[in-house]
Amino acid sequence: MKLYSVEEAQAALPEIIPVLEGISAAYVELRALQASLSAEVRGASGDGHLLANPWQEGGKNRVEELNRELRRGAAELDRRGVELKDPEKGLSDFFHDRHGRIVFLCFQLGEARIQYWHELRAGFAGRQPLWVT
C-alpha cells in the first residue's frame, strides 16, 4: 500500500484526473447503453427480435470498448495505489498517514484540490476538512 502525503496526492492529481474523467465518461455511457437496451427489449418485434441493437456501433462492440476503458482506468489507479470509490462521480481515495493513523485522503472530480480526509471505514459521509484535526 502506498501512503501519500497531502502534497504527493495533490501533485498526482494532474495525472489522476484524466483517468477519473475517462472512467466516469465510460461508466455513464455504459449505463446509458444498458438503459437503451432495456428500452429496446421492451420494443422488440413480435417474434422477440430486437429492432435495433444499441450494443453495436458501426460494427464495433461499444460495450466491450467501454468495459476495456473502465478496466484500463481502474488498473492505472491501482498501479498508483489510488482506490476508486465511485466511477460515475470520479470519487477516489489515497492512503495517508494522519497523526500515526492510516486514513484516506478523499478527492472527487470537480473539486479543485484535495481538501478532505476520512477514516478507512467512514466513507464519503465521514469526510472532514484537512485542517480539522
Image: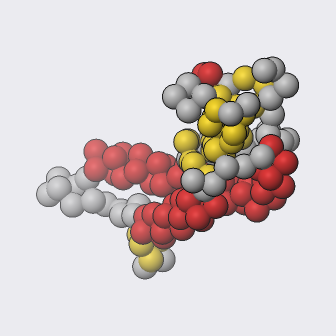
Above or below 73: residue 117:
above
Q: Residue at x 56, y 59 (%)?
A: 78
Is residue 23 at all visible to an observer of this figure?
no
Q: Residue furthest left?
A: 47
The number of discs equals: 0
Task: Please tell me in which quadrant of the rendered image residue 95 appears.
Answer: top right
| The C terminus lies in quadrant | top right
Q: Position of residue 40 (x, y in %)?
A: 34, 51
Q: Residue at x 58, y 64 (%)?
A: 79
Q: Position of residue 18 (x, y in %)?
A: 72, 60
Q: Say left or right for 99 vs 67.
A: right
Task: Please tell me in which quadrant of the rendered image residue 69 appears.
Answer: bottom right
Q: Residue furthest front?
A: 100
Is residue 14 at all visible to an observer of this figure?
yes
Pick the residue in front: 133 or 50. 133
The type of colouring in the image is secondary structure
Q: Residue at x 28, y 45 (%)?
A: 42
Q: Say left or right for 100 vs 61.
A: right
Pick the residue in front: 98 or 42. 98
Above or below 61: residue 77:
above
Q: Position of residue 89 (x, y in %)?
A: 62, 41
